[in-house]
Each structure stands twice: as structure tokens, then as C-alpha cells.
Amino acid sequence: MEKNWLDWGREIQALAQNGLAFTKDPFDRERYDALEAGVVVKPTKIAAIFDHRRHGYKPHLYHSYKVYMICDFVGGEQKTNIETSEVAFFEKGAIDTLELDPARVTREHILRMFEHFANPLLAADFD
């Protein structure tokens, strides 16, 4: 049986609640708390799946893929946490004023997501 978004949401909520109940580590506590709070979105499209090794990201011990999704804003509020020092929406033209962590995101990928947002029929990008 194929899972729907509601099923995934219930599983994530259960993981977060169990984590909050049993963790003693403040870093993990904030991660579990972030699963239950903050901005609420509805994913509408997988825009890209990129191999981090092929796109100029800083080297990491582990191999990973970046999955970019286009989402509709549903509600909630923007919050910083132990992993995020600043949260804000911005216009495409403001990208050159942003200080981006090259280990996490590239300007090129953000600009590509603006293209996907403007054109929902644009095919997903894959490595």
C-alpha cells in the first residue's frame, strides 16, 4: 500500500514526540522540536536531486544527495534553531546580498529553484 502525506506526517510526529520524551541531548531535543514546530508547508514538486560531490559543496565525510522541493506555504512562523542562525524569505534579486554556507547550498541551486517555482512544469533536475 502506498503511503500518503498524512501517513508520513503522522510517522514524523510520532518520531518527534518519542525523541522529545526520551532524549537528554539538547542538540537532539532541538532537532525533534523542529519536526513539530515552525513553518508548515505542502510539498508540490521535487525540483532536483543533486549529488553534493558534483556541485562544488565543501567536502564531507559522508556521501549525500541534496533534495530540493517546491512547497506551498501553509502557515506557521519562521524560527531559528541550533542548526539555523537566520530564517527569512527573500526575493530572487536579493541573492547576491546573502551570506550562504557553501557546505549547505549554492547560489546556482537557489537560482534554479526560483526557475522551478516560476515554471511548475519544468522537469526535475537529476545527477
Image (cartoon, rainbow, N blue to C red):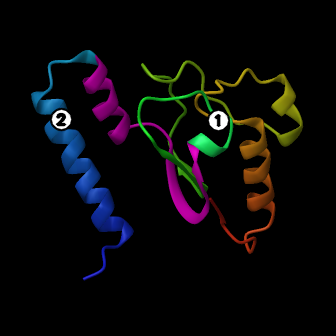
* SS state under label 2: helix
Task: Please report the residue visible at 42 percent of the width from the left and 29 percent of the height from the top.
Answer: 61
Could you say which is closer to the camera, residue 43 or residue 58?
Answer: 58
Magenta stretch: give its range. 27-52
Task: Please report the residue visible at 28 percent of the width from the left and 66 percent of the height from the top.
Answer: 7
Q: Earlier in the sequence, mark 2 or mark 1?
A: 2
Residue at image mark 1: 105
- Please tell me how crowded label 1 is: few (under 14), some (14-19), or many (20+) other residues with Cα within 10 Å: some
Image quarter of the C terminus: bottom right
Q: x%, y% of residue 75?
A: 53, 48
- Using the rendered view, name the quadrant where residue 85 is placed: top right
Q: Is residue 96 left or right of residue 16?
A: right
* SS state under label 1: loop
- Please tell me how crowded label 2 is: few (under 14), some (14-19), or many (20+) other residues with Cα within 10 Å: some
Image quarter of the N terminus: bottom left
Q: x%, y% of residue 38?
A: 45, 37
Residue at image mark 2: 19
